[in-house]
Image (tube, grey):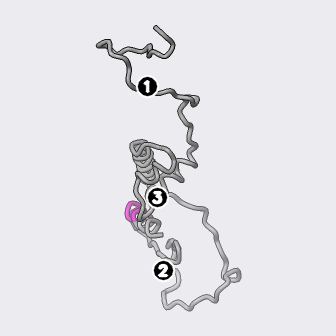
Amino acid sequence: MTISEPTLRSSNGEPTRRFEIFTGSGRRRDWSAKDKARIVGESCAPDTTVSEVARRYALSPQQLFAWRRAARRSTKKVDALGPSFVPAIVVTPEQQTRPARRSKRIPGRDAGIIELEIDGVRVRVGRGAEARTVGAVIRALKAGA
């Protein structure tokens, strides 16, 4: 046998017709959570396909679909915990930047009312509102943002 002859043989004794040489490190890439979130966000943009984004980052579409599925599961877990709250800021009438509107409501009737403002949409939640309903309204407002 000379050096120019193929040394690899298939199971039926024929010479090997094709083989690949991997020159890279052969390791898996380790994507940070921030990078995964950015790539998943790009794949969810309108007028783009998962395959386009996967090719751009040298991923298989299956891997990107797995990341998207994991992202959906993590948001479902957060939603299952119920409504989440942000710190409340109490502003006295003297601190308000816009003039107070005169209300025709009976004083004391607003006690216990929560007012939320999300992207310019104001929602008032009165006493007795179910937490599940309020959570659904907040999620709908966030989704529309």
Q: Which of marks 1 and 2 is in front?
A: 1
In this figure, which residue is indicated by the disc labeled 1?
19
The crowding category of the residue bearing disc 1, from other C-alpha atoms within 10 Å (few below 14, some 14 to 19, many at least 20), is few
Q: Which of marks 2 and 3 is nearer the N terminus?
A: 3
| Viewer-closest of 104 and 45 | 45
Question: Disc number at residue 4?
Answer: none
Which kind of residue does numbered mark 1 sit on? Phe
Of all residues shown, which one is farthest toward the top?
Answer: 1
Q: Position of residue 91 (x, y in %)?
A: 66, 75
In this figure, which residue is indicated by the disc labeled 2?
109
Q: In this view, does 101 lie above or below 44?
A: below
Cα–Cα span, label 1 and label 2: 80 Å
- For the point 46% across and 58% down, which residue is it? 83
Question: Disc number at residue 83?
Answer: 3
Cα–Cα span, label 2 and label 3: 25 Å
Which kind of residue does numbered mark 3 sit on? Pro
The answer to if 87 sits in the magenta stretch is no
| Viewer-closest of 141 and 57 | 57
Circles 2 and 3, Cβ within 8 Å, touching? The answer is no
Q: Is residue 27 left or right of residue 131?
A: right
Q: Position of residue 100 (x, y in %)?
A: 61, 88
Task: Please report the bounds of the magenta region as a residue range.
Answer: 130-136
Give the SS element for disc 2.
Answer: loop
- For the point 56% across and 91% down, which residue is it? 102
The crowding category of the residue bearing disc 2, from other C-alpha atoms within 10 Å (few below 14, some 14 to 19, many at least 20), is few
Give the SS element for disc 3.
Answer: loop
Q: Earlier in the sequence, mark 1 or mark 2?
A: 1
